[in-house]
Amino acid sequence: MYGSLLVLHSLLRWLVVIALLYAVYRAVRGYRSSAPFTTVDNAARHWTATLLHVQLVIGVLLYVKSPLVQYFWSDVRQALTQQPAWFFSLVHTGLMGTAIVCVTVGSAKAKRATTDGAKFRLLSIYYTIAFLLILVAIPWPFSPLAQRPYLNTF
């Protein structure tokens, strides 16, 4: 089950990145051009937040089952000397959690905003911050902290 969750997590990671990039694009474009907030914009807002919440559930399941995280919490002092252990146990988790909070708050505020410009502005700010946090928190193959392949295949 753990391997299947890793594969699903790996595929969903790219859907999240694409959806968030698309939502940021639409928000910035809409804000700059003073466009009306359409059903497509609202769908981008909604489905981006939904994908991130699905990714959160899978991430939490992986976190509690991860041998690396279990090792970290069994001997924190020793594990702090090993970059992958503290990266996944603390840094990745904290940054991704913060990014999900940004998307959730931004989506809720934009949904309740009364003007189209305010909706686009809120989404631009919150979703861009979340996007940058996610890019930093992804364990890229070239990262000095922790490496993972672009796609996990088991």
Image (spheres, rainbow, N blue to C red):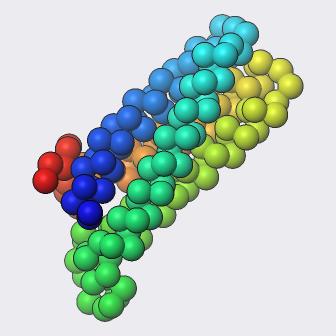
Q: Find residue 43 and report its image quarter.
A: top right
Q: Residue at x 25, y 71 (%)?
A: 83
Q: Quadrant of the N terminus?
A: bottom left
- The spot of residue 137 in percent (x, y) is 38, 53
Which residue is the extreme one toward the left?
A: 154
Disc count in the image?
Answer: 0
Q: Nearer the viewer, residue 46 or 136?
A: 46
* Place of residue 12 in the rendered image (x, y in percent of width and height, measured from the top left): 36, 42
In the rendered structure, the answer to whether residue 47 lies left or right of residue 60 reads: right
Q: Residue at x 75, y 32 (%)?
A: 111
Q: Quadrant of residue 18?
A: top left
Q: Position of residue 96 (x, y in %)?
A: 47, 55
> Looking at the image, is 145 positioned above or below residue 30?
below
Q: Is residue 115 visible?
A: yes
Please state if 38 lies on the left or on the right of 81 as rendered. Answer: right
**Residue under the image location 67 percent in, 38 percent down:** 107
Residue 5, relative to residue 90: is it above or below?
above
Question: Is residue 142 among the parts visible in the rendering?
Answer: no
Frontmost residue, 107 versus 8:
8
Identify the residue at image location x=76%, y=19%.
117
Residue 8 % position (x, y) = 30, 48
Image-based side of 40 in relation to 153, left or right: right
